[in-house]
Each structure stands twice: as C-alpha cells, then as structure tokens.
Amino acid sequence: MAPWIAAIFSFMQIAMFRLLGRRMRVQGRPLLLLTTTGAKTGRRRETTLGWFPDEERGNGSRLVVASNAGAAAHPSWYVNLARLPDGAAIEVDGHKFAVSAESLHGAERERAWKRVVALAPGYGKYGQQTDREIPVVRLTPKA
C-alpha cells in the first residue's frame, strides 16, 4: 500500500474511533487507541487495535496481537513498542492512561494465543499465513 494511502486509512480509522468509540469492533472485539513513540522519528503514532482481557494478570491489563493481518513483517506499532515499551498510552471507553508493554513468551504466550484464537478465530488464520510467530503484547496500566 502506498504510504499516502496508508496515512489516509489510518486517519479515517482514528476519526471513526473517536466518533464511535466503544461501538467499533474488529473480529467482534472492542477497540482501543494505542499511542506509541516512533522508534526512528520520535513522533507520536496512533493506531486502533482490537484487545482482549488479560485473564492471567488482571489489574486492567489488556492483550493486543501484532498480527499485521498475517503479513511477513511485524506491524510498525509493534516495532515502536519493542524499542520504546514505556512510551505508550492507550485510550479505552473515553479514558486515557499510560501503559507499559511486554511481549509474552513461551508457555505464557501460548496460553494467551489460544484464548485469543478462541475469542476471535480470524487470528488463527493469520498465524497460518506467516512464518513468523505472531507476538501477543500485554499492556499494563502504569500506577
């Protein structure tokens, strides 16, 4: 996709999120607005993502999936989080708060992945489309 088309698409997604908020869904999942800091540019970046409750951690933590629709490369928001995990914030149901991000690994990631696929089976297809292990990221509100 051409960069200018991606920029327009991103702008429209964020505008729709701000307008419709909790009524928007992706694969039946509610959305959040993730704000990251660009790893190369240092600029604030926003993207809408479906989220899942973090049943293992609780405490308002949420899980997001860096599927990139099954593409071979990680999505840019994930790269930004991996490089600057403490520079993130989310907006959910009209509330904004800073979060720390942690990629899950091993058995913890596998348990989370199984829950994600059970709740939104489309993610399972993404996992079959790519050779990379799709990251599952825990977003935990900062105190």
Image (cartoon, rainbow, N blue to C red):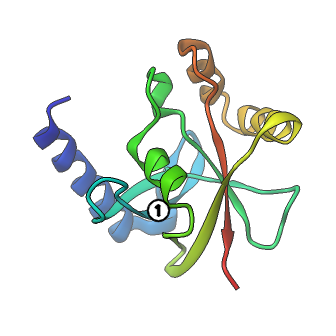
Percent coordinates x, y for residue 32 in the rendering: 51, 62
Say which residue label 1 marks: 34
Q: Measured along the vertical axis of the image, is residue 20 above or below residue 50?
A: below
Q: Is residue 51 above or below residue 44?
A: above
Q: Residue furthest bottom?
A: 143
* Disc 1 crowd, CA 10 A, few/some/many (<14, 14-19, 20+): many
- In the current view of this chain or complex, which residue is farthest to the left? 4
Residue, x 49% and y 60% (percent of image)?
Answer: 84
Q: Amino acid at mark 1?
A: Leu
Tell me the element at label 1.
strand
Q: Name the quarter where the C terminus is drawn.
A: bottom right
Residue, x 56% and y 39% (percent of image)? 27
Residue at image x 49%, y 70%? Answer: 87
Which of the 4 image quarters holds residue 35?
A: bottom left
Horizontal placement of 75 versus 43: left or right? right
Q: Position of residue 110 (x, y in %)?
A: 82, 33
**Residue 107: horizontal and vertical position, in percent?**
88, 35
Quarter assignment of residue 66 = top right
> Residue 94: x and y, percent?
49, 79
Q: Which image quarter is the N terminus in?
A: top left
Relative to residue 62, is residue 54 drawn left or right?
right
Q: Residue at x 42, y 63 (%)?
A: 36
Q: Foreground residue, 34 or 21?
A: 34
Q: Looking at the picture, does residue 27 appear above or below residue 11?
A: above
Q: How many marks?
A: 1
